[in-house]
Image (cartoon, rainbow, N blue to C red):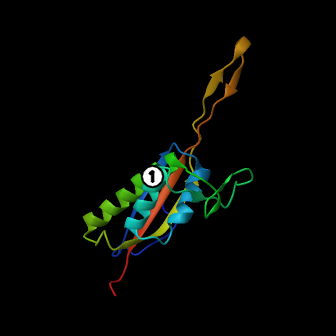
Amino acid sequence: MGYTQETDAENTSRALGKEMSVSPKHCREVCKMLTGMKVEDAKKYLEEVIELKRAVPYTRFKMYLNPKPKIGPGRYPKNAAKAILRVLQSAQSNAEYKGLDAENMRVKVAAAHRGRIQKSFMPRAQGRSTPWNEQTTNIEIILEEIEAS
């Protein structure tokens, strides 16, 4: 499991969250919103989603979703936003460690991919069992420094 894009190491920083126990579908929708945002705006956006103040518009898997004000079908994926916020903060601290201006960066790549499925089972009546699998997600964030104009 690696990064999906090769980047210039001098003006980018990156972070990877491996096998986080959140839904890949929710993470995909949140990451789609973050791409292109400045780091501070992205952090503020994720904190508003966690506080249920701002909804995330869904572009897939939206058949029975209720419309949210001003965005259409959407949800408040709280757990996905928490996981992505941790990876985003890690990428920002990696930028500080490399000596980059962590405040003057934008999200170049925000991607979520399905991770390994943790297989388990749930005991049922009369000696039977039911699969009880947990999905995991690999979250990748790459930040790039914006040229001061």
Q: Residue at x 27, y 65 (%)?
A: 96
Q: Quadrant of residue 42?
A: bottom left
- Extreme residue toward the top, this view: 126
Q: Is residue 1 visible?
A: no
Q: Is residue 138 visible?
A: yes
Q: Is residue 58 left or right of residue 4?
A: right
Q: Is residue 114 left or right of residue 62?
A: left
- Under circle 1, the secondary element is strand
Q: Position of residue 54 (x, y in %)?
A: 52, 57
Q: Quadrant of residue 133?
A: top right
Q: Residue at x 71, y 14 (%)?
A: 125
Q: From what the image shows, is residue 27 above or below residue 126?
A: below
Q: Quadrant of the C terminus?
A: bottom left
Residue ID for mark 1? 17
In this orientation, which residue lies closer to the viewer: 124 or 106? Answer: 106
Q: Quadrant of residue 14?
A: bottom left
Q: Residue at x 51, y 42 (%)?
A: 21
Q: Position of residue 120 (x, y in %)?
A: 60, 29
Q: Is residue 116 left or right of residue 39?
A: right
Check disc 1 and give the amino acid type. Gly
Query: What number of labels is visible?
Result: 1
In this orientation, which residue lies closer to the viewer: 17 or 39? Answer: 39
Q: Residue at x 30, y 60 (%)?
A: 93
